[in-house]
Amino acid sequence: MLNTVRARRGMVTSPHHLASEAGLRVLREGGNAVEATMAMAAALAVVYPHMTAIGGDGFWLIGAPGEEPVAIDACSRAARAASPELYFDAGHEAIPQRGPLAANTTAGTIAGWGEALALSVERGGRLPLSRLVEDAVWHARNGFAVTASQSELTAEKRPELGHVSGFADTFLVNGAAPATGSTLKLPALGETLHRLGNEGTESFYRGALAREIAHDLAAAGSPVTLEDLAGCRASRVAPLSVKLPGMRLYNFPPPTQGLASLMILALFSRLRVREGEDFAHLHGLVEATKQAFLVRDCLIGDPDAMTGDPRDWLTDTALDDLAARIDPARALPWPAPPSAGDTVWLGAIDGNGLAVSFIQSIYFEFGSGVVLPQTGIVWQNRGSSFALKGESPRVLAPGRKPFHTLNPAMAQFEDGRHMVYGTMGGEGQPQTQAALFSRYAMFGQELQAAITAPRWLLGRTWGAETVSLKLEDRFPPALVDALRAAGHEVETVAPFDAMMGHAGAIVRQSDGRLEGANDPRSDGAAMGF
């Protein structure tokens, strides 16, 4: 993808072209950005099943130019039976990353759909959920072409997932990963999405569908019960924000790492770097990332268990102090704890300016690996990120929310532009956001160029064994040498490596023109009309 997509009546972007098409169809039929995003989210749960599912969590930012956006928190909570003792008694010193004991939280995604639909109606939305899941249901029933990333990741993860309840029957063909381009059907999931369209989102938690979900979770060995599902709710919360010269940035509050994303850009802005793509740009963002991650890892977890206010770290005093700790010539020794993640970010802006930045995740690829046979739902393993010992807000306790790497982003510019942007990629999410946003908003690159340009990742994600600074090998050798000389432990990777995330962005200009971009590292598309 080389050129920015432009349109006037509506724009969508997602990491799979069939999902983008589903969202564009909704906009063409007069649906709004929330409705288009929901159609894309449903389609992605089918055609990109290694990256997302309705058995995960979701976070929304919804707003229009000139107004404060609304955040919808659709985060799960740990089951009532999910305590450290459950794992210690089973002989575990840490929560397993796969299998039924990794499926220890509820799934908030569908509750978030319900809350977003309610907000959509308040903004004039009129399309029923049955229409919004239409494309997803069709693809699940009739089949979709397996992407290269699904085929490759299925083969890579088969040794750890093949024995997990329901996985092989759903995602393997004769015991092997499906071939790229082959047709895969998910009939049970299609029926579930059809039922949700007719019965409503409440059925997932407090209806007949909930009883089937709870039965299959129990049969698999998960601690999540019908009572846990019934207690799952999504809520509207205030986003975090920070003011930069000429713009205000918005992101998601805890339990997500949205604070880190805002801090990186706010710290970098204080370094007064004048040009993009040089040593000062990359070094400055990497060092800002380190400072933000140090704060994140000491502070962020379940908001009810946190002892500090994340907004305190977005004040001028706090940001000035942290920025002063960044050496413009030398790298701070690293590493920090890694975070993996498999997620989808998607965005939409309609002709009236209503904008959505949305992220939906099951944590690792295929989540816990548990697939519920009656409903075809893949259940997340977000709760495997809980610690079992200590006093931090990330320690497992019944009803506690897990730490999330997810953080949808939005920006409003003083010149009237309105932007939604984001990516998947666990630890890399704030870094990719900083890369694309700084390139576009601070250094004037075209939107698509800002996403296509080579990227970097500090830390370990997507199964990598090292915590080095990874650079796509399209960076100039002189820049790579300069980073090494400054003390960065540099490792080069493939030119368009999926570990760098699947980013996307949409900008609405002050006169209503729309610009969209999508990541060539994904299977997606930005589409407008």
Image: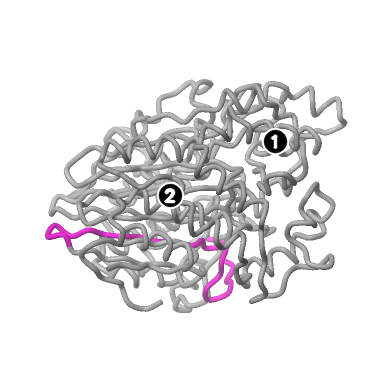
Task: Give the structural element (helix, strand or loop) at label 2.
Answer: helix
Check disc 2 and report the residue beneath it.
38
| Residue at horizontal 32 percent and vertical 41 percent from the top | 120
Residue range of the region highlighted in magenta in the rendering: 488-512
Residue 140 vs 262, above or below: the answer is below
Q: Residue drawn 54% across and 55% down?
A: 425
Image quadrant where one finds the N terminus: bottom left
* Point 13% across, 54% down: residue: 415
For discs 2 and 1, the disc positioned in front in the rendered view: 1
Q: Position of residue 268 (x, y in %)?
A: 33, 51
Relative vertical location of residue 32 with respect to residue 205 in this rendering, above or below? below
Q: Is residue 13 above or below residue 38?
A: below
Tell me the element at label 1: helix
User: In the rendered view, would you say 235 is above or below 452?
Assistant: above
Q: Quadrant of the C terminus?
A: bottom left
Q: Position of residue 203 (x, y in %)?
A: 56, 33
Horizontal side of residue 80 vs 468, given as left or right = right
Residue 187 screen position, x and y as percent: 66, 56
| Residue at 32 percent of width and 53 percent of height | 420
Residue located beneath label 1 in the image: 212
Residue 403 at what x, y percent from top left? Answer: 56, 36
Q: In the rendered picture of this protein, how many numbered marks are placed on residues?
A: 2
